[in-house]
Amino acid sequence: MHPAALECLPRFQTKLRTERRLSPHTLKNYQRDLDHLCRFFDEQGIDDWSAIDEQHVRQYVSQRHRQGLSGKSLQRELSAFRTFFRFLISEGLLKYNPAAEVQAPKSRRKLPDTLDVDKVKRLVEIKGDDPLTVRDRAILELFYSSGLRLAELLNLNLADIDQQEGLVQVTGKGNKTRRIPIGRHALAALGQWLKARNEFVSRDETAIFVSQQGRRLAPRTVQKRLKDWALKQGIDVRVYPHLLRHSFASHVLESSQDLRAVQELLGHADISTTQIYTHLDFQHLASVYDKAHPRARKKTKQ
């Protein structure tokens, strides 16, 4: 692309940051997607936004799909492009949105992994009274009790916890806030950690979960601690923060059958995102049926 055509990119990033209040992580994704698009246009000899049409966008999608990009990833890229092209229209640099009618190829939706209730119980009930174990137990319990994302948990401050009401206020994607109940086991573990936390922090630190140096925990630290605890507790699958969120959603839906409530608890903007857990529930029911129904059982070899 011609350097003059690229001058709008910083303005677009500023608009996303100030008006839509997107997270740094999401802004990086936008930038990466647009870098891919600009490189493609360079290869096509296109140096101005006004020269782009729908066919160019379709060619881009086809090329990326041949390179192995999934339908879901292409859908995300197209969403970013539509937003960017709308911005260009508002700037008078485009007359129409060339990505408006372009669809990503469909890909089979992978069901999220979950832990069964027994494995979750074994994982969260870690033993020990040292401050780090007390902290990690509170983290594990809160992940499973409230279905938090990793970033949501790490961004929690002291003011976000209402121990009296048993609620936590969470800031999720798009800076949207929601209040979620905290289970009694998680509340007890959290209370123990808040007492032990004083060994690490100064009065000015507001983060709930901190390192030994008294600073807010980093994502990689939590990921590694979960992996280490899973090994110590004899969990035979890879354990990561989102696995506990998936397990929370699946178990609550299985017990309640209330999809809307689970959507609210998870902070999903679109209920179709939550519906993936109904497939998990059906998968479980099908497995139970196959094992229990006399005419569903497979014949054993004589």
Image (cartoon, rainbow, N blue to C red):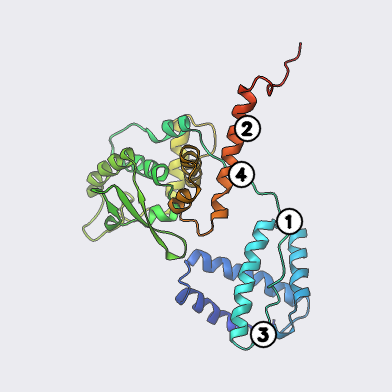
Q: Residue type at mark 3? A: Leu
x%, y% of residue 70?
69, 56
N-terminal-most mark, 3 or 1? 1
N-terminal-most mark, 2 or 1? 1
N-terminal-most mark, 4 or 2? 4
Residue under the point 46% across and 44% down: 224
x%, y% of residue 273?
56, 53
For mark 2, what is the residue? 286
For mark 1, what is the residue? 68
Query: Element at badge 2?
Result: helix
Q: Residue type at mark 1? A: Gly
Circle number at residue 111: 4
45 over 199 or under it: above or below: below
Disc 4 to disc 2, how far (Cα)?
15 Å
Circle number at residue 94: 3
Residue 195 showing in the rendered view? yes
Residue 43 figure quarter: bottom right
Contact between marks 2 and 3 (CB within 8 A): the answer is no
Residue under the point 78% across and 59% down: 66
Query: Element at badge 4?
Result: loop
Q: Residues within 10 Å of mark 4 (few under 14, many from 20)?
A: few
Q: Residue type at mark 4? A: Leu
- Which circle, 3 or 1, is nearer the viewer? 3
138 over 33 or under it: above or below: above
